[in-house]
């Protein structure tokens, strides 16, 4: 008979963990590790980072997963290093080198090219991406040696700052800080910039330093989370409403709050608004989202009464580990 194995008893956990994703892990691997450390029942993230990227990865637990989509539209800021002269099959350091060219551009040429990539741009998503064609991820086609047609996307590069450059020596590179709209592939941006410089290149490092209202200084690492006590891990969570910045707030009394949570529209002296975050007054508690039209508060994504009570109690006391025969 095999020895007993301990199984973690899951529990309701609600909130947002700002994780500094480590190098080498996929976003889902990082999520599963954090979920295990928190012993959370339900978890999700707000958009992926490549395994070779590090940085800000907001993880949503419990009720926060209902609002994770709200964050997908947020602008992002990255710091990245473009290795010049070597083009790879994946546009990053993970791929095979497919061409090698001399780097002969000048600093003035670099500045000129970077200026061309500022503002609205069109970008063709890379083959090594999770975008799907006929229900199949593009990276699966790429691994089979097949290239499929992809539609160009309209994006905005809000800011493109040259932090450092080296155009001579064995490892010429550019280090950039990029603030961009959602859906921007920094690998493709780096490859396109290097191609415009006439030498080709690939991303050798990528770090997300800001996403929406969150920046890297607010993040915790998996190592830090693992070293914490269970109570401190829960304290590291931000409240669910941090995913709803800038929304108009509406507070409801207990009678209206109960009806609102049942999906009933509530009349009131409110101005039409597309994005509203709704709270109960006594006690103050997040109820969900809504929009106002024609003087009516129309429910959107709602928390359940059980979730609200769990949040107010700041989650139940930790359960003991259970032994399980396998």
Image: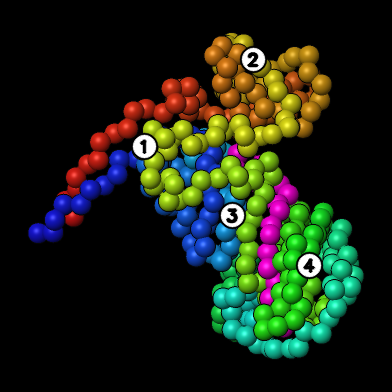
Give me the residue at 42% from left, 38% from top.
233
The disc, 4 or 3, on the residue closer to the chain's N-terminal end is 3
What numbered label is drawn on residue 184? none
Q: Position of residue 317 (x, y in %)?
A: 34, 28
Q: In this rendering, is residue 94 above or below 176?
A: below
SS at mark 4?
Answer: strand
Mark pair 2, 3: CA separation: 38 Å
Q: List the residue tagged with mark 4.
A: 123
Give me the residue at 73% from left, 49% from top.
75
Q: List the residue tagged with mark 2.
A: 252
The disc, 1 or 2, on the residue closer to the chain's N-terminal end is 1
Q: In this rendering, is residue 195 above or below 246?
A: below
Q: Position of residue 102 (x, y in %)?
A: 76, 88
SS at mark 1?
Answer: helix
**Coloring scheme of the render?**
rainbow
Q: Position of residue 302 (x, y in %)?
A: 58, 30
Between circles 2 and 3, the one closer to the viewer is 3
The residue range painted magenta reads: 67-86
Crowding near the residue tagged with mark 3, few <14, some 14–19, many ≥20 C-alpha atoms within 10 Å: many
Mark pair 3, 1: CA separation: 23 Å
Q: In this rendering, is residue 196 above or below 250?
A: below
18 vs 150, left or right, is: left
The disc, 3 or 1, on the residue closer to the chain's N-terminal end is 3
Q: List the residue tagged with mark 1.
A: 230
The disc, 4 or 1, on the residue closer to the chain's N-terminal end is 4
SS at mark 2?
Answer: strand
The disc, 4 or 2, on the residue closer to the chain's N-terminal end is 4
Give me the residue at 70% from left, 52% from top.
76
Q: Is residue 36 shown to the viewer in this render? A: yes
Mark pair 4, 1: CA separation: 44 Å
């Amino acid at each position: 008979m095999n020895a007993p194995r301990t199984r973690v008893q899951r529990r309701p956990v609600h909130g947002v963990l700002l994780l500094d994703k480590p190098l080498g892990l996929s976003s889902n691997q990082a999520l599963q590790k954090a979920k295990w450390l928190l012993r959370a029942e339900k978890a999700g993230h707000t958009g992926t980072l490549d395994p070779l990227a590090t940085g800000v990865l907001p993880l949503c637990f419990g009720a926060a997963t209902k609002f994770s989509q709200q964050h997908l539209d947020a602008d992002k800021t990255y710091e990245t290093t473009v290795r010049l002269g070597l083009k790879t099959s994946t546009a990053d350091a993970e791929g095979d080198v497919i061409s090698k060219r001399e780097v002969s551009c000048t600093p003035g040429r670099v500045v000129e090219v970077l200026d061309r990539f500022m503002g609205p741009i069109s970008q063709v998503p890379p083959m090594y991406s999770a975008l799907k064609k006929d229900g199949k991820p593009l990276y699966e086609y790429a691994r089979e040696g097949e290239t499929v047609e992809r539609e160009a996307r309209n994006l905005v590069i809000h800011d493109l700052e040259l932090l450092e450059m080296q155009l001579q020596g064995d490892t010429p590179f550019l280090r950039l800080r990029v603030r961009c709209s959602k859906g921007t592939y920094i690998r493709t941006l780096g490859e396109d910039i290097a191609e415009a410089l006439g030498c080709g290149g690939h991303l050798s490092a990528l770090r997300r330093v800001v996403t929406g209202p969150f920046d890297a200084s607010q993040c915790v690492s998996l190592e830090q989370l693992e070293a914490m006590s269970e109570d401190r891990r829960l304290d590291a969570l931000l409240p669910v409403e941090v995913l709803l910045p800038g929304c108009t707030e509406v507070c409801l009394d207990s009678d209206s709050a109960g009806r609102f949570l049942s999906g009933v529209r509530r009349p009131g002296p409110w101005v039409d608004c597309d994005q509203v975050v709704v709270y109960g007054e006594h006690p103050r508690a997040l109820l969900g989202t809504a929009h106002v039209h024609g003087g009516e508060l129309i429910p959107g994504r709602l928390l359940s009464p059980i979730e609200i009570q769990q949040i107010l109690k700041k989650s139940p006391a930790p359960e003991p580990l259970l032994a399980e025969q396998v």
